[in-house]
Image (cartoon, rainbow, N blue to C red):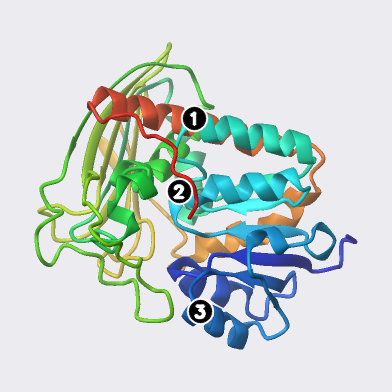
Amino acid sequence: MSDAAPVRLALIGLGWAVHELWAPLLGGHPGFTVVAVHDPDPVAVRWAGSRFPAARLLNEPGDLRPDEVDLAVVVTPNHLHAPIAISLLERGISTFVEKPVCVSSDEAAALAEAERVGGARLLAGSAAWHRADVTALRTLLPRLGPLRAVELSWIRARGIPAPGGWFTDRRRAGGGALIDLGWHLITIGMRMLSWPQVTQVTCAVSGDFLARAGTEATWRGTGPAAHAAPYAGAPKDVEDTARGVLEIEGGPLVTVCAAWASHSERDVTRVVLDGATGRAELTCTFGLSPNGVGGSTLLLHRDGRAESVDVPQQDRGAEYRRQLDLVPALLADPGRPGSAIAEVTRTIDIIERLYQSAGVPQLTAVRPR
């Protein structure tokens, strides 16, 4: 693939994320061309055929040929992320997987082996890292001194995704708010700390809002495959809220709170870095919720004074465009193999340990069907 050639993409899974994020971003983008699509839902397939008329319609992800694609993008229900990515990587097809990349440490190990065997690249979704406000927060780290505490929270007022569908069925989702929203929070916080050793965790989970009317996400649209289809008798056995604490070897205490629903009026994300010489507080709203705080605020507290730090205000979803723009360079980077799965392994290990601390039974593998 030459530097000037568009990256040939296959979209595996054509649900809400593709309809609302990937398709608008790819439309007219000179760096990418969609050459193949797959989804078991015929409505979604018809929509993709009209949106990407030159793309081949795959009966199965296994029909994708390594010679026709540069990158497969896996945007399926969570329990299919790793199995599909493993099959693609083993056949030498580089694969981008939306978070959560996997739902267990066993899946992470299998992904690492598939990447090694196939010689392909695994790329992992981490759009929040590319937000302008998060970047601005990171620039303040040298002014804070040694960090004593890190607070990570993403609390929605109302935002339970598709109650009664796969999102609220733990065997298919891998968990609730912790694995969904918490994956972003943990990745951001631990990256800022350069991934230190987590020595101990404690966590509590609850599901007080799962059965309440009016707590579902209202911004997931009405287009093709916008909502997760309900399963017959599907349980609502995930948490809508998780509160955890991570003890870091030689480092700060890290608190994590992820909530799909709450008593709050607005959906609010906060990242707070409390150091020996300063405290930085970012208040914003991650994701695409229209019920956010209406912009980002970044404050630097030092010596009893609060200083407002300018943050570039970007359009909702700009972080996903930035993530997409970086894909060609990541694919071409000779030092890239293994780096994404190493981070994925650390992330899912922390999440598993938090669930274990909360008394959530270990997840058993679910086979695609």
**Residue 188: x, y in percent?**
46, 40
202 up-or-down from 308: above or below: above
Quarter-wise, where is residue 67 in the image?
Answer: bottom right
Label 1 packing within 10 angstroms: few (<14), some (14-19), many (20+):
some
Quarter-wise, where is residue 158 in the image?
Answer: bottom left
Residue at 22 percent of width and 43 percent of height:
239
Residue at 34 percent of width and 71 percent of height:
220
Q: Is residue 43 left or right of residue 31?
A: left
Quarter-wise, where is residue 148 in the image?
Answer: top left
**Cα distance between the residues tagged 2 and 3:** 21 Å
Q: Is residue 89 left or right of residue 50?
A: right
- Please give the residue where the numbered disc 3 appears in the rendered image: 42
**Cα distance between the residues tagged 1 and 3:** 33 Å
- Looking at this view, is 8 or 147 the one in front? 8
- Please give the residue where the numbered disc 2 appears in the rendered image: 79
Query: What kind of residue is marked 1?
Result: Ser
1 or 3: mark nearer the eye: 3
Q: Please tell me whether mark 3 sits on a helix, a strand or a loop.
A: helix
Label 2 packing within 10 angstroms: few (<14), some (14-19), many (20+):
many
